[in-house]
Amino acid sequence: MPATLRFALYLVALTATATALLLSSGKLVLTAHVGDVLHALESGYRMVDGEVPHLDFMTPIGILGFAPIALFLSLGFAPGASLVLSNTLVTALLLPATVWIGSTRFEGWARRVFGTVIVLYGMAFLYGGIAQATSFSMHYNRWAWAITFLVLTTLLIPSRGQPRPVIEALIIGLGLSALALMKMTFFISFGGATLLILLASRRFRLMGMVAVVGAAVALFVTLLFGIDFWFAYAGNLLEVAVNSPRPYPDRDMMSTLVAPDRVLGTLAYLLAIVVLRGTGARQQGLALLILAPAFVYVMFQNWGNEQKWLVFLGLFLVANMPPADARAYLGIPARKLVTGLLVVIATLIVPPMLTMSASFLKAPYFNEATARQIPFSEGPRDLWITKRGNLLRSVVMSFTETGLPPGEDPADFPPQVFQGEELPRCILQSGYLSNVYEGLKLVASVPEAANAELALADNVNNFWMFSDIKRLRGGAPWYYSGTYGYENADYFLVPLCPKGPLKRKEAIQAMESTGWQFDEAARSDTYILYKILR
């Protein structure tokens, strides 16, 4: 059997096995980032109902981040199964390119590692990290990394056989287009780096072909959704970039680079550039130097700040391994230096890859006794959450800026006054769904509000998924800033201890900017409900 066919069958079997494992129990348990998962599902449901991202609801995530989920929801699959099958669909669409690139760029174990990583990043039921968790959160980042690896490998590692510039242009052009329609952070970072690398290597013909592919995709999307789609997309991105209360999702830039759990990866990358250029592979070292800002920026802007690019760095070094007789560098034979770097890279990146692999068994076979089914108001239910993490409500209070628990940031507890009342400075640490139940009980106590459109001063406004409350037209599945959908809201629900205090502050300021009046309709220990008077 030809090696390429064996490789293809291996990847198909790997994808099918991961899918079968995740679907085998008929349930999937979320242990972390429940709000993020519900945000993805809400976006999918909106698309099923005919809404288009950016045009009908605000989101900085591109349409391809939610379209696969919407497809399976529209076919009648349960929410959890739709998430799994969207993973499968994206992975399957990447398999032809993965097989071709793996077969033309790598041999032996390196080929298997490359293909396995693409499938793992496509299929895992976890964003990464080393915590034994399960969640579909930040799924678009996993997909984008897999696409990025395909683009960069095609771009930077020469084919071992006859060059196929048309195929290369299709992979690079379609890959970058997918990134633009999935997560713009990736497109801006790696699209710019790709342009610089093509210019530096004087591959003008390939650059022109990639531009043609990208233009064809842009024309197709324009014909499908109209020119306003692009203006709305740009507006959503600009809104988040300029007005979001948080400029980055996790650590600051310096911590991203030199924190104790990141500094070895940073040093390995820098040393790889030095060694490659010092041993004669100057173009390869230059390519890594050009890519460095892109890797850093994407890592900085992705929650968790994980150095997923270490996988590509390792494979790139394998493909550019110095010959045995290469001259020594820093007094150490170049080949030994690169081998040492590969050991460091593997040590750093294998643990999160193992946790991602474990999600195939943990998500469907988590102990049901310690979990509870998510009670969607309509349709089949196959998503569960852990009781401890999501049903037992706990909050952290801040009475003064100096009275915080260790590790808490005063900026996360902004002072806030609404309707002349100073709101508590606190943050919801656990009990996400129980907090939703409390809000629903309060809304249900006001008969006129039970079937009204509701604006929420917090991260995720998905009450409609669990009740008869109407979905906020024009709203944002995940609130960033602004007044999106507020003109359609009948009531404004303010949590006393929100999941995102900064988002509560931003939402209240946005609502006050409208000039409307607010009449308190009901309150409880957890929420205040206001009727909006226009």
Image: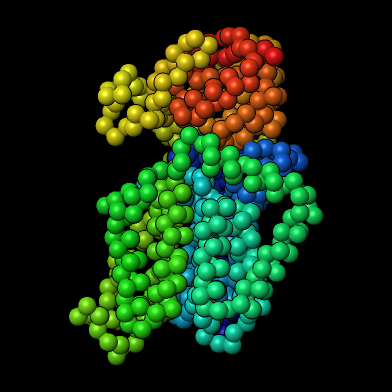
Q: Nearer the viewer, residue 438 or 233?
A: 233
State the residue at coordinates (36%, 84%).
280
Residue 336: give x, y in percent of width and height: 26, 79
Residue extending furthest toward the bottom: 325
Is 345 positioned to the left or the right of 81 in the image? left
Residue extending furthest toward the left: 331
Residue 492: give x, y in percent of width and height: 60, 19
Q: Is residue 16 visible?
A: no
Q: Quadrant of the C terminus?
A: top right
Is residue 423 positioned above or below 2 on the image?
above
Is 46 positioned to the left or the right of 24 in the image? right
Q: Quadrant of residue 277?
A: bottom left
State the residue at coordinates (62%, 28%).
483
Residue 113: give x, y in percent of width and height: 44, 70
Q: Nearer the viewer, residue 279 or 122?
A: 279
Q: Nearer the viewer, residue 1 or 211?
A: 211
| Colour approach in the figure | rainbow
State the residue at coordinates (56%, 62%).
191
Is residue 211 positioned above or below 43 on the image?
below
Residue 442: give x, y in percent of width and height: 57, 14
Q: Quadrant of residue 266?
A: bottom left
Is residue 36 positioned above or below 345 on the image?
above
> How many numbered circles are shown?
0
Q: Quadrant of the N terminus?
A: bottom right
Q: Nearer the viewer, residue 235 or 17?
A: 235
Q: Is residue 403 visible?
A: yes
State the residue at coordinates (51%, 65%).
193
